[in-house]
Amino acid sequence: MKTEHKWSFFKAGGIYQVEFNSGADIANIRFLDQKLWAALACPTRGVHFDFATLDMLDTDKDGRIRSPEIIEACEWACAMLKNPDTLMAGSDNLKISDIKDDTEDGKVLISTAKEVLKNLKKPDADSISVKDFDDKSAVFAKTPFNADGVITLLSAESEDLKNTISSVMKVAGSVKDRSGEDGINADLINRFFDKLNAYCAWKSESEQNKDKIFFLGDDTAAAFDAFFAVSSKIDDYFTRASILAYGNASADLVNATRENFAEILKGDVSSNNELLAALPIVKIASPDEICFGGEENPAWKAKIKLFKTSVLEKMQIPSDSLSFENWNKIKAAFAPYAAWISSKSDGGISDLGEAEIKRLSEPSQKVALFDLIAKDEALKYAVDNIERLEKLVRLNRDLLELLTNFVSFKSFYTRKGKAMFQVGELFIDQRVCELCIRVDDAGRHAALSPLSYTYLIYCDCKRKGEAPFTVVAAVTSGDCDNLLVGRNGIFFDREGKDWDATITKIVQNPISVRQAFWSPYKRFAAWIGDLIAKRASAADANAMSSMTSATEKNAAPKKLDIGTLAAIGVAIGGITTTISAILIALGGIGMVKLPLYIVGAILLISLPSMVLASLKLKKRNLGPLLDANSWAVNTRAKMNLVLGATLTSSAHLPKGSRKCLKDPFAQKRNYALPIIFILILASSIVGACLQAGVIKNPFEKPAEEQKSEQVAPLTDAGQTAEKVK
């Protein structure tokens, strides 16, 4: 009876996640409840992972890795190795001795590994690495057949087949095979023989109608070229002559005019003069014939001479003149040849020569080439073994890392390295943000990112010569006072390349409870600052208006009068009275209770903001950020305050640094206003304390003396009244 596999779990992100401690954990991955998996799918792009490995795992080629594909890869890799614990090392090199040698599949992979190492000129090596598969042409070097459907000169078994392959490449082109050699495939072979058959059919037509097409025998081709060279000009002559016969008034128009010759004689008057060649072949006269009496157009003289010897003399037509009737006979005689030559289907076949064309026309040549193609494709199983071997070597290195980024998020939560979805680090505002995720779909991010309850900044990253991209960075410590849209930073990707990063969007959320404590006061200070700025701006505008008005009236500005001074005194008195009232109220509370009331007031202001921030920080979740990037996160991947503090770090001076406290550019302090404020505050406090009885007035008389002084005035008043009576 099979015992149930015992799993180990660690707690991170508020949930338990599986831990891979041995190869047995990998081998039994099918029996781990998928409800306990951290993710159920992830994309093959937009992550920091070897794309070649992900593409091998993506069996349906849809650009996503799903849990069934992970399970299949784990079970296959464990089945190919003697000890699944080999996968725990994550090594680039796989020892051949670690591959199972007691199964047929294992034996095939071992022999394949030895063959690959032999091709790489490392026959004595005892291990094979991922880098050995980087250059596929080296893996398949000098191999005549490698199951890619391409045959090369190395594939030819005779000199005759080599010549055939060379001819096909010359006419139809070539493709590269896995060894890097130029070769041909079935498509190119069919294309070549289609061209060859069309050319042979064209040639066959001339044999069947030889008497009509080659009516001058072997001289037909040369005669046609001479005929074709002057045919358009002879047609032009008869057309012009018919116009002249229709109306003599056109004589100056159909022949060359004085202006034509004046233009011709301005330039080069050689026989290649284009203006001269555009004139009639001979002077237009009779519409019934052309007279060749030595007065031909100099530009056409050589071609007319060749036409006479190659056509007129061969066809036994008088060469001194050419009648319109004979001209039509000549055109009719060359019509079959012209039609045949215009239907020529060459495609480069004729360049091979008649002897080579005749040899390639044999049906056995095409059959021999397809026999080589079949032989090459018959080795597909052997070549597939090379791909399986590469897959095993890659899984030996990458499988454990993939599992700790997919089945669990150990790579992210242990903070000993970086997870595959962390694409780099963003340096900005004297801090570095380590949780940076690539953004491929801005629309999905806009919908899901607020659900992460994390302070996020979106940055466009650019680098000369590279395609730009966007990342979203999580800010999990510090404050957000200087994080504004448009600010620039530097993004370093996982390969160490630096990119210019510019903030384009910010998703506001609490960063910490400490920030939430101070946020009401910062907002109040900002409000006061804005209010002061507005009032100062208004006062400045009024002052400028007054000065302008005074200048226009040529009047001196008014001096500060007694009423203004009185108003200032009243204002100061009001402030003092207000402060005194507050202090009196506090004095009435008593010095023992006063600190408690102060703390209560502070909490009354900051506590709501802190509570709201605390509730949101507890909900801070990695899941929505990954889901927006086509992941299928299967758990609540929380980011608490402790983890968040490690994801964003601020600048600190190194330990043992020497610090010079003297700042030559420090702002000089003006102590006048603080002293005045302190004096006013002190007088208010003293007055309040005296009124509340907290302290005694040293100048105050005892109560008995005050009483006697109150009685004495009354007695004096009575005596005075009696005297008056």
Image (spheres, rainbow, N blue to C red):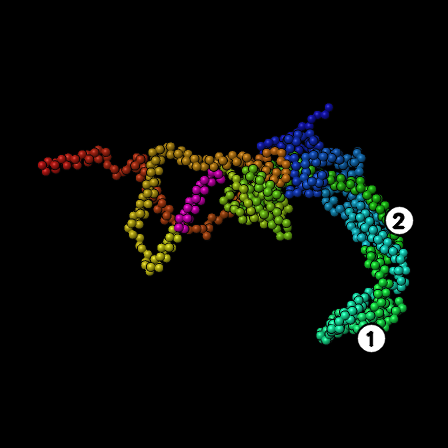
Q: Give, as a three-letter code, the residue at label 2.
A: Ser
The structure residue drawn at horizontal position 84% and vertical position 53%, both measured from the top left corner, is 198
Decide: few, some or many residues near mark 1? Use Cα within 10 Å; few <14, some 14-19, many ≥20.
few
Q: Give, as a three-letter code, the residue at label 1.
A: Gly
Q: Which mark is residue 364?
A: 2
Say which quarter of the image contains residue 594. Answer: top left
The structure residue drawn at horizontal position 68% and vertical position 38%, both measured from the top left corner, is 65
Decide: few, some or many residues near mark 2? Use Cα within 10 Å; few <14, some 14-19, many ≥20.
few
Image quadrant occupied by the N terminus: top right
* Magenta run includes residue 516: yes
Q: Position of residue 300 (x, y in %)?
A: 80, 71
Question: Reading the chain from its start, which is encountered first: label 2 or label 1?
Answer: 1
Q: Main secondary structure of the magenta part?
A: helix
Report how far apart the C-alphas of labels 2 and 1 lie in the structure: 60 Å
Q: Nearer the viewer, residue 669 or 446?
A: 446
- Taking the view exactly as shown, the residue that stands out farthest to the top is 1
Using residue 171 as the reference point, say whether residue 50 is left or right of it.
Answer: left
Q: Secondary structure at mark 1?
A: loop
Label 1 sits on residue: 294
Query: 386 above or below 161?
Result: above
Using residue 368 as the reference point, say whether residue 590 is left or right of it.
Answer: left
Q: Nearer the viewer, mark 2 or mark 1?
A: 1
Query: 203 above or below 635?
Result: below
Q: Position of residue 497 (x, y in %)?
A: 62, 48
* Magenta run includes residue 612: no
Image quadrant occupied by the C terminus: top left
Q: Which residues are magenta?
A: 515-538
